[in-house]
Amino acid sequence: MAAVQETVERVRSIEVEAYKYGFVSPIESEVAPKGLNEDIVRFISAKKQEPEWLLAWRLEAYRRWLTMEEPRWARVAYPPIDFQSIHYFAAPKSGPAPKSLDEVDPELLRTYAKLGIPLVEQEVLAGVEKPRVAVDAVFDSVSVATTFKAELAKSGVIFCSFSESVRNHPDLVRRYLGTVVPATDNFYATLNSAVFSDGSFVYVPPGVRCPMELSTYFRINEKNTGQFERTLIIADKGSYVSYLEGCTAPKRDENQLHAAVVELVALDDAEIKYSTVQNWYPGDSEGRGGIYNFVTKRGDCRGARSKISWTQVETGSAITWKYPSCILRGEASRGEFYSIAISNGRQQVDSGTKMIHLGRNTTSRIISKGVAAGRSQNTYRGQVSAHRLATGARNYTNCDSLLIGRECGAHTVPYIEAKNASAVIEHEATTSKVSEEQLFYCLQRGLSAEEATALIVNGFVRDVLQQLPMEFAVEAQKLIAISLEGSVG
Amino acid sequence: MLEVKNLSVSVHGQPILGGLNLSVKAGELAAIMGPNGSGKSTLAYVIAGKPDYEVTSGEIWLDGENLLELEPDERARKGVFLAFQYPIEIPGVATMTFLKAALNAQRRSRGEGDLTTPDFMRRVREASKALKIDMEMLRRPLNVGFSGGEKKRLEVLQMTLIQPRLAVLDETDSGLDIDALRVVADGVNALRDPSRGFLIITHYQRLLDHITPDTVHVMANGRIVATGGPELAVELERNGYSAYAAETV
């Protein structure tokens, strides 16, 4: 309850310009020439001093990508993307591999401080009571700093930038890369496979419960730059890890492409909890600018009794095309998807999940809360399938949509297929409006229209907010309030 | 303190109130009685500023302030409180959270700081005890699954916490059993104060067995058609509204 109050307070403190992460940092960077061809792929690979097998993997993906077409089935509309006018690599000039935080460009650290990221280890260490979160920060195309690495290493947890993992843990990378999202998976995933620049890598050894939250912050700074990061998380037998990613970008008039790939692998009895607070620049109220967020996220419950849980709070991006999914391969494995997707202005969201039940007695749960305001369009698209051998598969889906105002739209598109007669799949969906009555009741008690809306929406999404790690739930509430600014007239 | 002058109101083009005059002085408790459809609830909503109620003529003043120029939340912060006939449900928002947000919004508008949590809890506990409200109820989402009696008691609890200048109670007695009616009446009586005005809208006399009004107005066809003391309510109970309903606008 204090947290809702906090939201209300934050709303009050907000200035007219709602998107407070819209600044540009004056950091010199090294940018690859615009456009995409085999030379650019080689350039990126060379910059990262990658082994031959990885370059070959990239080139194969690139050649495949040339034969593919952009997906057009989502309920989003945008002009054709000119893939030759994008920079596929940008890196802060100070050099991509600092040995410690002291070597990181102070301007970068200032940027992250503005974003509220506790990058400086000492600060976090000093506050004994503070939650301890290890952070990997990705700026444009490269990872600039990973905190708490030494401490994590004590328990055997590997948490580093993707480039570093290729250098230091090539066997692990080679064994798992592309095994959840193959390089041929879809147009954007394949593009990512060809040009991915950096990202985070996590390996949790057998039986280890990762001693702190792991977190990555992604920041697009450079103009006309695409961000193509790749995250790979492996939870070995009986291990547990909780991981959070946050994203922001400066305000720019042109659209920027973000096409990431996230692969999760959970072996026997392992659990991965993956939370996202996505706040890419959504464009202005007329729909100019903003990030195209075309992301492929998939988890493989490869081992028996393994569990993968996705929690996402999506408030940003001009267009969101994203379906964090679980492949429930291991017997009695479990997939969960908790989502809050908020759209305002001209934002378009087409998001949801896939739960693919392959193993016996696999279970999944989907709770999706869509909130549409302004002239936005908000679609939940979800697939639940139980395959022939998935005896005893169970799914429960609940999709609720909330509309604010008269010019927005909410849509629910479920795909359900059961090839095993014992599967039980439940789907519930509701659509409601923030009613005039609810608003008037709140106003009559002295709350402003914005306070009232924030309160009502926070009530609507509460079930999902409770799934977030405590310290991020507060941030998420703040974001919800900010993103609904101006949605009530 | 409250002056309603020649007020005419339409809802979706349909005239409901026609030339209504009414005044409530500080310290006065006025009852408005009348048959169904006479416009009682409309008057309550218009004072509070509900959208979709179109004021076609007339004025409403509170303490020298023109209420019709203020938004509903501004009116609330000036001291107008409406106890709803049908309180609204807000899923997922704990009642306690709502109470605290409302109370602090009002305090801030008066330049007072937010209540500390212990101070807030103390006030809620005291007021709840008097109204026989279980604290457990306040942890549930606002009005969701509340019984009729629980909803009405919660309205009075909010009124007690907010301490308004003018309290308008819209059929707060409807749907209450006799014990709940007494609790609600005690809550209202406890708030009577020389600086506070009450406008109590009711269809039946029975609430007025427990709350003695200073003034009783009879409303019919969108206007006040008779005004008197408590004896008027007794007479209405005996003879019904037929003598007044015959009069037309």
Image: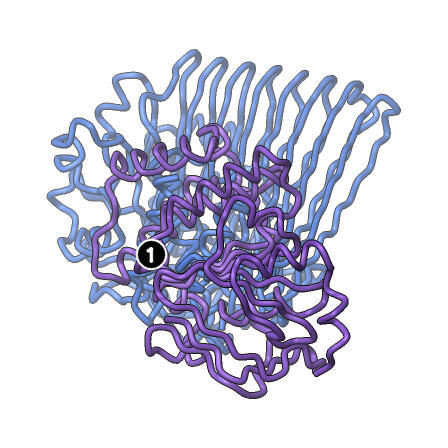
Chain colours: A blue, B purple
> Where is residue B146 drawn, in percent x and y?
60, 37
Marked residue chain, label 1: B
Residue A13 shows up from this direction:
yes
Q: Is residue A69 left or right of residue B189?
A: right
Residue B45 shows up from this direction:
no
> Where is residue A238 drawn, in percent x and y?
48, 13
Q: Is residue B35 left or right of residue A32?
A: right
Q: Is residue B15 above or below residue B74?
A: below
How many badges with numbers are in the image? 1
Report the amino acid beneath label 1.
Answer: Ala
Residue under label 1, please give it.
B105
- Residue extending farthest to the bottom is B57
Quadrant of the image containing the N terminus of chain A: top left
Q: Is residue B214 above or below residue A7?
A: below
Decide which of A167, B100 is in the foreground and name it.
B100
Q: Quadrant of residue B70?
A: bottom left
Neighbor class of circle 1 (other Cα within 10 Å; few <14, some 14-19, many 20+) is: many
Q: Quadrant of residue A108?
A: bottom left
